[in-house]
Structures are given as structure tokens and as C-alpha cells.
Amino acid sequence: MTAVTLHPPGAFLYSLHHLGLDCHVPAKAIWIIALLCLAFGLQAQPRQVDLYLPDAPPLTLVQDAKGHGIVGDATLLALKRAGYRVRIRVEPWARAQKTVMDGRDLLIIPLSRTPEREALYTWVAPVMALDRVFFSLDEPVKSFEEARQRYRQIGVGLGTAQSDILHREGFADEQIRHLVLGDKPAQLLLMGRIDAWFTGVTEGLYILPQVTDRKLHMSPPLATTDLYIACSRQCDPQLTDAVAHAMQALRDEGRVQRIQKHYLPGVQ
């Protein structure tokens, strides 16, 4: 924040006389003018907002030379265009969701808009759609019904929409293995610790080539949700409107699509 120094009234009058101006301004008026200048100066400072995100490449990245991921970069651009400064906050994903839900004017990405979450957040703006698929070592499944019959252990990120989707589709709790940050689902799949990894197409296609040359099978998309910038249930309408308009402009300009190509150049 810019520091503002308030000089005593005498110094202000001295400056006027030094400039050759014969002014007789009451001291009280000078202080009022100074306070108004301070108020306008503070208003001119961009408002800071807290943005919660996980390390979930390539959607969001915490520390990476490329940037903050597809959704991360797009969100930061939208917030800058809307006139906000950003403080990035990183917490375990389930805790971050609860912090934002119970807080005020806190933002979180990338959050899938699902029926289970609909009433828990203020939904600010969609960034991109995300298809969910099963990655496996054997012949890919073609439906949730087939997956329920074939897979004993399915890896999904803890607190993700994937878990909600599988429960909604009738999978038993013992079939769903919740993975936390650092569990490395691709390696678990290769070691046979899980039978399939249910995740977003972009995450799988980004991570798998980095850990193995082995060909893995991908099912057709079996579920799709929009990834949103979401805010606390108590959220300033001015914030939501400004960010929503900025994100829509970025989408209309093709900026989000260009960001996607930056992180996944070989994927259409």
C-alpha cells in the first residue's frame, strides 16, 4: 500500500507562500483536504482478493516456470482485467473448499459445478469444460456399468468431483480409493495398486507421458462438468460481476483456448 504523509498545516501554508501564492486557508480546511486526498488515494489501490488453488497440473500449478496452469492463468488474467490484486493461497484441497465455503469473498479454482456443490458456493464464471475418463492398463471400459463390474479399486482425488460422480453412479465405497496430494496415481496404476484412474482428460494426458512410455488405455468421456471460478456463499456482487465479465471477454477473445495449447500443445 502506498504510504501517504500528512504534513502539518503550517508546512502546507509555507509551500503556498514559497510558490508566490498569498493564500489564507484555515488549518481545519487544510486537514479536511488532506484527509480527502488520503481517502481517494486508498480507493485508487486495487482491492486484494485471496485465491485458493491446488497443485493439480495442468489445470492449476503452484510453482512452475510455465505459469499457474490452464485455469490458473485464465483466472489471474480475468482478475487483473477486473482490477483486482491476487494473493494465492494453497491448502489441502478438501480444507480449501471448506475455508472458501465458510468464508467471505474468497475465491477458489478449479471447482466443478456439480449438484452436490450447487448451494455451497457462489458460482462466478465458467473457465472450461472437463471430460472425465478412466485410464487403465487393459482394454478400456465403455460405460460406468462396465467399470462397476470390472474395477475393484479406482483411484480418484480426495475432495474432487470425480468422487461425487462415482458415488452418484452407484459405485461402492470400497471400490473408490481416495488419493491425496503426493499419492502419484499414475505410478499406482502402473504398479497394479489400483485398477483404474478416474480423472480429467487433461490431467491424464499431461501427467502420464511424464512418468511412463507404456501405452495406457483411455475410456471414452463418461462425464463432463464445467470448471468454475467459485466464491464463498457470502460474496460481493461487484466482485462476481466484474470477474464474470472479464472471463467472458477472455473466452470470446480466444485467450483461454490459447492458454490450453500452451500447456497441452499436442492435444486438440
Image: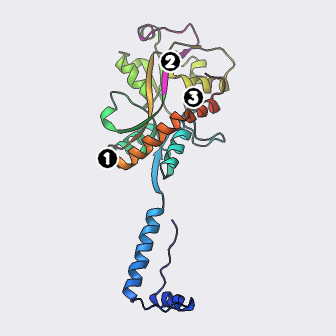
Per the model, the C-alpha gap separating discs 1 and 2 is 34 Å
Q: Any magenta on residue 174?
A: no
- Nearest the eye: 91 or 25: 25
Task: Report crowding for label 3: few under 14, some 14 to 19, many 20 or more residues within 10 A (C-alpha).
Answer: few
| Residue on which the image places disc 2 | 133
Location of residue 175 with respect to 94 vertically, above or below: above
- Does 170 sit left or right of 22 as displayed? left
Q: Please report contact status of discs 1 and 2: CB closer than 8 Å, yes or no.
A: no
Give the magenta range.
129-146
Q: Mark 1 packing: few (<14 Cα in 10 Å), some, or many (20+)? A: some
Mark 2 lies on a secondary structure that is strand
Is label 1 in a helix, a strand or a loop? loop
User: Is 87 situated left or right of 261 in this image?
Assistant: left
Query: Could you tell me residue 99's position as x and y percent?
Result: 38, 45
Q: Name the residue located 47 percent from the left edge and 80 percent from the top edge.
A: 6
> Along the polypeptide, which appears first: circle 1 or circle 3?
3
Which of the two marks, 1 or 2, is nearer to us in this view? Answer: 1
Viewer-nearest residue: 180 or 229: 229
* x, y percent for residue 46: 48, 57
Residue at which label 3 appears: 184
Q: Looking at the picture, does residue 164 appear above or below residue 108?
A: above
Say whether residue 173 is visible. no
Identify the amino acid type marked 2. Answer: Val
Q: Nearer the viewer, mark 3 or mark 2?
A: 2
Mark 3 lies on a secondary structure that is loop
Q: Quadrant of residue 145?
A: top left
The amino acid marked with disc number 3 is: Lys
Quadrant of residue 240 within the rendered picture? top left
